[in-house]
Image (cartoon, grey):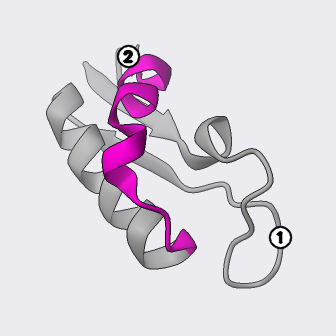
Amino acid sequence: MVKYARCNALLSLALDASGEGCRYMSKADTEDGVVEDMSKHLVSMHQVDANELVANIRATTKTTRK
């Protein structure tokens, strides 16, 4: 099973480097892994304080079988 979260579920108006809607997806084996990876993305790409969004990241994290 893989855990994942999408950037656009957290920041609906966020743009990627090309100016398009950000479609970044964080994947990891654990929820903590998703939080860590998504936090790095939010800080580096969107200059957002990820510490304020940890609960939101956890709330939007889903699980898939692949």
Is 22 within the magenta?
Answer: no
Q: Which residue is mark 1?
A: 20
Q: Which mark is residue 29?
A: none
What segment is highlighted magenta in the picture?
46-62
Q: CA distance from mark 1 to mark 2?
A: 26 Å
**Up-down relation of residue 62 to residue 57 (above or below):** above
- Across and down, in percent, residue 40 comes to 31, 64
Q: Residue furthest bottom?
A: 18
- Asked if residue 54 lies left or right of residue 12, the reply is left
Amino acid type, mark 1: Glu
Image quadrant in which the N terminus is located: top left
Which residue is drawn at the image coordinates 80% and 61% (left, top)? 21
Classified by dominant secondary structure, the portion drawn in magenta counts as helix
- Asked if residue 10 lies left or right of residue 1, the reply is right
65 or 23: nearer the viewer: 23
Q: Which mark is residue 63?
A: 2
Q: Secondary structure at mark 2?
A: strand
Which residue is drawn at the image coordinates 33% and 36% (left, top)? 54
- Asked if residue 45 lies left or right of residue 31, the reply is right
- Residue 38 in sight here: no
To which quarter of the image does residue 41 belong?
bottom left
Amino acid type, mark 2: Thr
